[in-house]
Amino acid sequence: MAHTPEDSGSEMSFWAHLDALRTVLVKSAVVLVAAAMLLFAVMPDVFDDIILAPCKGDFVLYRLFAKITAQFPMLPQFSTEGFGVELINIQLASQFFIHISTSFWLAIVVTFPWLVYQLWTFVRPALYINERKGIRMAFTFGTMMFYLGVAVGYFVVFPVTLRFLAEYQVSAMVPNQISLDSYMDTFFGMLLVMGIVFELPLVAWTLSAVGMLHRGVLRRYRRHAIVALLVAAAFITPTGDPFTLTIVFLPLYMLYEISILIVKRDEAEK
């Protein structure tokens, strides 16, 4: 009995599965729309205090960098004075559509655990009892790592990238005028990329569970991975100084080491 699906005694018909899926989609849509409407109402404050916060010189990361570099004179000194990014809108309807789209995307981020839970309730009856624990842990771990990646993207990767690109000039005769659309595309792109990157341990665990990856492989190619992660960090953060490069590289390397710990050992290693 411990190795049979939940409703094996009475298999659900196609229409019953369809009805269950419809229920899941309706519940998910109701919560998602409600969250989007709430966020739409408070979006001006969300924009000023959260989304546009990296545009200000007193952003938490900038103040932290300034304190750290002040303690080590050999590092390039990071200053919060005089920095600020002013965005411009060049299309008539951009602000209205960005108001709507941002409310929707943030609603997905906020309700992500609920959406995953609804997916779980639909999939669970088809799983064996011994499979449910692993899938539940994978969903929970994946959700936590996604939020952690988004947080790293917001507090570290995006502000560092914004500061570098906003101040970079190929010529002093070409001032930077950053459009709202460009800012929002980069903002959500960075956060999404970091959220996906932080799923690396979950991907490694999944490949290990199906026998496609073992701990020895990750250990054997650790040096190659370090080089690849340094290149990835340099690509994500186009600054030239080693300090900011290290800030981005360390979380990526931490993910690799976590992946080594959670994957299965090869039979030769046991």
Image: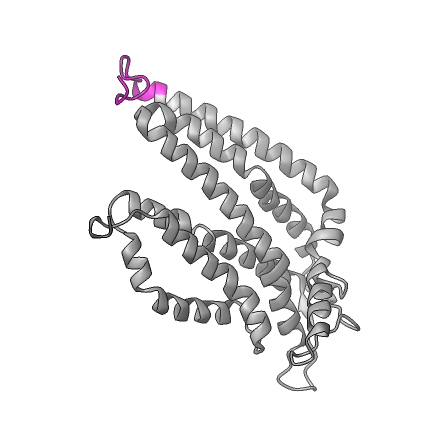
As drawn, 135 above or below 75: above
Does 5 sit left or right of 84 as displayed? left
* Colouring chosen for the image of the structure: one colour
The residue drawn where x is 41% and y is 57% is 256
Q: Quadrant of the N terminus?
A: top left
- Residue at the front extreme of this rendering: 270
Foreground pick, 109 / 250: 250
Q: Is residue 127 visible?
A: no
Foreground pick, 19 / 239: 239
Does 251 sit left or right of 261 as displayed? right
Q: Report which quarter residue 106 is drawn in.
A: top right
Residue 266, x across and y down, in percent: 24, 50
Residue 194, x across and y down, in percent: 51, 56
The residue drawn where x is 56% and y is 41% is 108
- Residue at the left extreme of this rendering: 268
Does 231 lie within the magenta span?
A: no
Principal SS element in the magenta part? loop
Foreground pick, 111 / 5: 5
Residue 179, x across and y down, in percent: 67, 65
Q: What's the magenta region? A: 1-16
- Residue at the top extreme of this rendering: 9
Does 5 lie within the magenta span?
A: yes
Residue 157, x across and y down, in percent: 58, 62
Q: Report which quarter residue 171 is drawn in.
A: bottom right
The residue drawn where x is 60% and y is 40% is 110
